[in-house]
Image: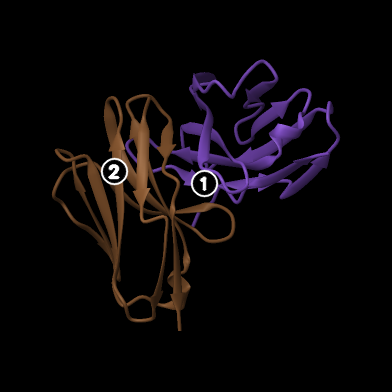
Chain colours: A purple, B brown
Amino acid sequence: EPEVTQTPSHQVTQMGQEVILRCVPISNHLYFYWYRQILGQKVEFLVSFYNNEISEKSEIFDDQFSVERPDGSNFTLKIRSTKLEDSAMYFCASRRTGEAEYFGPGTRLTVT
Amino acid sequence: EDKVVQSPLSLVVHEGDTVTLNCSYEVTNFRSLLWYKQEKKAPTFLFMLTSSGIEKKSGRLSSILDKKELFSILNITATQTGDSAIYLCAVGAAGNKLTFGGGTRVLVKP
């Protein structure tokens, strides 16, 4: 069964450094998402992406964040200058029209 | 602001028991309600509900939606230790995002 994949599974970075989190959505899906979950808290929406552009973003998704679909398969989240409070599990998700969102296994980001 | 509230926060049952998990919501332009199971990392999809009163069933799990009263329940019958997890309710609005509840942590003891 097709799955969303994410790399790396764990990323440790120093405050102020740039990180890129990578995702490969399910191949025939058209809507792509990034969510995050800070330890012990709710899963929070960051951004949705459709037809090669951002369709919606949350207030968390400020100028430090960007997304890209550089080719037909990858979907990336870049954080330009990481802060301690960016430490969280980042989930990529994808879906087809009218269907449910399927989540990847997540990337645990630790900012020191 | 969209809001999803789950109850109870947590529960402990013994194998063979039945559990009922609740999810109430307030969203603008409701699209769908989804249930996920979160064991270690990623939320795993269980059900998507869009219409009131139609029960969705998968093995020992079932779920139903009430769009008039704005809630859903997830039932697990004949619980097994493998059902131990956090169960997440999420509501999709007409935009694209899902709004998640805080989850219900279920522990099934042998």
* Helix, strand or loop under label 1: strand
C-alpha span from label 1 to label 2: 23 Å
The local crowd at label 2, few if under 14, some if 14 to 19, many if 20 or more residues have their Cα within 10 Å, is many
What's the mark number on residue A103? 1
The image shows residue A20, relative to residue B6, as above or below, that is: above
Identify which residue is drawn at 18% across, 42% down: B51
Identify which residue is drawn at 30% across, 30% down: B27
Whole-percent x and y of residue A71? 65, 29
Quarter where residue A84 is shown: top right
Q: Is residue A28 visible?
A: no
Q: Are marks 1 and 2 on the same chain?
A: no
Task: Decide if residue B6 is on the left or right side of residue A75.
Answer: left
To which chain does the residue with label 1 belong? A
* Residue type at tag 2: Ser
Whole-percent x and y of residue A67? 63, 25
Most extreme residue toward the bottom is B110
* Residue type at tag 1: Phe
To which chain does the residue with label 2 belong? B
Whole-percent x and y of residue A26? 52, 44
Identify which residue is drawn at 74% across, 46% down: A8
What's the mark number on residue A73? none
Q: Is residue A111 visible?
A: yes
Task: Decide if residue A67 is on the left or right side of residue A19.
Answer: left
Count how many numbered circles sit on residues in the image: 2
* Helix, strand or loop under label 2: strand
The image shows residue B52, relative to residue B36, as above or below, that is: above
What's the mark number on residue B24? 2
Q: Nearer the viewer, residue A93 or B100?
A: B100
Q: Nearer the viewer, residue B5 or B87?
A: B5
